[in-house]
Structures are given as structure tokens and as C-alpha cells.
Amino acid sequence: MITPIEIRQQTFKKVLRGYDKDEVTSFLNTLSMEWERFMEEHKRTKSELEKTQASLDNLRQVESALHKTLLQAEETSKTTLEHAKRDAELKLAEADAKAKELMHRSVEERSRIEMQINELVGRRNEILQQLKSYLQAQSERLKTFEDKEMKSGVVMEQAPEVKTVQEPVREEARSFFESGHGGITDAQVINDLADEL
């Protein structure tokens, strides 16, 4: 390939009428061919450079898009993580509140049940005391009646009476005490009955 220096240093033989026309023409042809080849190569190189530039631009766009996507993914990941954390905290707070509410209800329910049990125990004790008092009163009446009968020495036949609601209990108490208990006092029998209830 001819260089610019060779073109500058190229000399032509002188003839009577100037340079040798064939040499000048030949050189110009060679120079023209080289220059044409150079122009084609320059055009090809320029085309390749444009393609390379276009590819580079595309790669830069892809890089920019990837960078944006990466930033968006990081932002989305961060937002998702924050939402998940916030949701977890809310659910934990809700669960804690429900647990406290259940605990409070359980304590209230336990207190209510304990109050009912205490009321029932109190009512039971009251009923037992009333029953004990009633049985003691009936026992006293029975003893008084038996003492009167023993003193008079006569067993009187009584006319049938209209029985009240308490009469069956009196009859049962009378038959119970009249049957005898082998030396056990009436008070002990009453206490035993109350304890069994």
C-alpha cells in the first residue's frame, strides 16, 4: 500500500516535453486505486463504527433499563419487606390484643363462676342450717309430745287431721325418732343428716 511519503517522494523522469506521461498516468492510476481502496475501507470502517456505536447505544440502553429495573426491584423488595414487617407487627398486635381479651374474659368468667359457686355454697349452707333448725324444732316438739304422753300414761287416739305441706316431714321425723337409734341422741342424728346433705 502506497504511503503519503512515497507519494511526496515520487519523482518522474524528465523528457523533452516534461514528465513521462505513461509514468504519471500509471502512478495516478495506482494512486487512484489505492485511494479508492482506502475510501472503501474508510467507508466500511465508518459503517462498522456506526454499527458498533449503535450496538453500544443499545447496550447502554439495556444497561440503563437493567439499572432502572434493578433499582425498581430493590425498591419493590424494600417496600414489600416493609409491608410484610408492618403486617406481621399488626397481626402480632392483634393476636396480643385477642389473647389479652381472652385472658380478661377468662378471668371475668372465673370470677363469675366463683361468685356463683360461693352463692350456691352459701345457699346450701343456709338450707342446711334451716333444715337443721327445722329438724331440731321438730325433735323438740317430739320430745315434748313424748314427755306429755309418758306423764299422762294414756295414749290417746287422735282424729285424722288435714295434713299440711310440712306434715309428711313431721310423720317421717316422728317415725324416724320413734324407731330408736341405740343410744344416739337426736342432736347427733340431726348433725349426721346435715353433714350428709
Image (tube, rainbow, N blue to C red):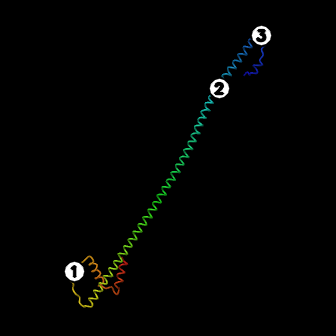
Mark 3 residue type: Gly
Q: Is residue 26 above or below residue 152?
A: above
Q: Quadrant of residue 114?
A: bottom left
Q: Is residue 46 left or right of residue 14?
A: left
Sequence-wise, which precedes: disc 3 or disc 2? Answer: 3
Q: Nearer the viewer, mark 1 or mark 3?
A: 1
Q: Position of residue 178 (x, y in %)?
A: 29, 85
Q: Which mark is residue 161?
A: 1
- Under circle 2, the secondary element is helix
> In what element is the residue under mark 3?
strand
Which three-letter amino acid code belongs to the residue tagged 2? Answer: Lys
Mark 1: secondary structure = loop
Q: Which mark is residue 46?
A: 2
Distance from label 2 to label 1 (Cα)?
A: 140 Å
Mark 2 packing: few (<14 Cα in 10 Å), some, or many (20+)?
Answer: few
- Compared across the picture, whether 41 is left or right of 156 comes to right
Q: Quadrant of the C terminus?
A: bottom left
User: Residue 74 falls in which quadrant of the image?
Assistant: top right
What's the residue at 65%, 26% (across, down)?
A: 46
Q: Compared to 34, does 169 lie above or below?
A: below
Q: Residue furthest top?
A: 16
Tag shown at residue 11: none
**Residue 193, relative to residue 8: is it above or below?**
below
From the image, tell me which residue sits under label 3.
18
**Residue at coordinates 69% horizontally, 20% vertically from top-left?**
35
